[in-house]
């Protein structure tokens, strides 16, 4: 995975986390399920963006192992 795609994943994860914080403080009546989904997606994208190249390749091999 190239670094530009990793930067985009990390940026998207950071933006989703920021949206979660804004929604949580501005709209306290927002459903918890949607806030949790937003935070979970943000964390996944952030972790994918920070994963080194070797870890990314190992993850792809593990994912495609059952095909």
Image (tube, helix red, strand yellow):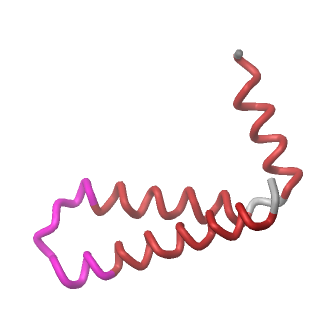
* Residue 32 shown in magenta: yes
Quick check: 18 left or right of 6?
A: left
Residue nearest the viewer, comparing 41 with 8: 8
Give x and y (percent) for residue 43: 53, 62
Quick check: 39 left or right of 28?
A: right
Looking at the image, the residue that sits furthest to the top is: 67
Looking at the image, the residue that sits furthest to the left is: 29
* Quadrant assignment, res 30: bottom left
Residue 37 vertical placement versus 4 (above, below): above
The dominant secondary structure in magenta is: helix
Give x and y (percent) for residue 17: 44, 73
At horizontal 80% and vertical 32% (from top left) the residue drawn is: 61
At horizontal 60% and vertical 65% (from top left) the residue drawn is: 46
At horizontal 71% and vertical 15% (from top left) the residue drawn is: 67
Magenta range: 22-34
| Marker count (numbered) | 0
At horizontal 76% and vertical 41% (from top left) the residue drawn is: 59
Looking at the image, the residue that sits furthest to the right is: 54
Give x and y (percent) for residue 48: 66, 57
Give x and y (percent) for residue 55: 82, 50
* Residue 37 shown in magenta: no
* Quadrant assignment, res 65: top right
Looking at the image, the residue that sits furthest to the front is: 4
């Amino acid at each position: 995975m190239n670094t530009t795609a990793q930067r985009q994943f990390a940026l998207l994860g950071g933006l989703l986390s920021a949206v979660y914080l804004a929604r949580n403080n501005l709209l306290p009546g927002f459903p918890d399920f949607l806030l949790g989904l937003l935070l979970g997606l943000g964390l996944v994208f952030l972790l994918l963006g920070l994963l080194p190249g070797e870890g990314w390749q190992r993850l792809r091999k593990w994912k495609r192992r059952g095909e």
